[in-house]
Image: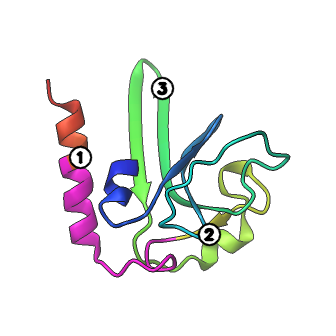
């Protein structure tokens, strides 16, 4: 997911203990690493991608979602992944003009290259 964002000039960040990929809202293309302890680990971040895994009855389910250009208003009424005040963003909102097919192709290529033996 981070490498796919990188291909669009966006720097993705991880937050320890929180599934998903986040971007610095003030500078989505900035390459500075987030360092040092923070009172709020989501300060200044927006969630651009979700990652998930579920195991039930000996079956595993995996999912990824990268927000491209969508109606984000449904996210205004919830706490994304249980984090109050966390903003959900898409590529369009952070200045990337692209379409779903292009993003899906690039993400698929990245996943295939990392999962191939």
Q: Nearer the viewer, mark 1 or mark 2?
A: 2
Give residue 10's position: percent from left, percent from top: 43, 63
35 lies above or below 94: above
6 lies above or below 60: below
* Magenta stretch bounds: 90-109
Residue at which label 3 appears: 55
Mark sitting earlier along the chain (1/3): 3
Residue at which label 1 appears: 110
19 lies above or below 100: above
**Of all residues shown, which one is farthest toward the front?**
32
> Magenta stretch: residue 77 in it?
no
Give residue 109's position: percent from left, percent from top: 18, 49
Q: CA distance from mark 1 to mark 2?
A: 24 Å
Answer left or right for 92 relative to 22: left
Give residue 30's position: percent from left, percent from top: 51, 63
Residue at the spot 35% in from the left edge and 82% down from the top edge: 97
Residue at the spot 49% in from the left edge and 71% down from the top edge: 90
- Mark 2: few, some, or many residues within 10 Å (few <14, many ≥20)? some
Residue at which label 2 appears: 25
> Magenta stretch: residue 98 in it?
yes
Residue at the spot 29% in from the left edge and 60% down from the top edge: 7
The disc at residue 64 is none
């Amino acid at each position: 997911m981070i490498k796919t964002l990188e291909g669009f000039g966006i720097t993705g960040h991880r937050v320890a203990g929180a599934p998903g990929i986040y971007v610095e809202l003030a500078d989505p293309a900035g390459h500075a690493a987030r360092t040092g302890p923070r009172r709020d680990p989501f300060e200044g971040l927006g969630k651009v991608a979700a990652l998930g895994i579920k195991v039930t009855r000996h079956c595993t389910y995996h999912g990824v979602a990268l927000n491209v250009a969508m109606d984000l208003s449904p996210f205004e009424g919830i706490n994304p992944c249980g984090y109050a005040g966390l903003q959900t963003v898409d590529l369009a909102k952070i200045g990337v003009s692209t379409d779903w097919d292009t993003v899906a192709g690039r993400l698929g290529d990245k996943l295939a290259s990392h999962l191939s033996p």
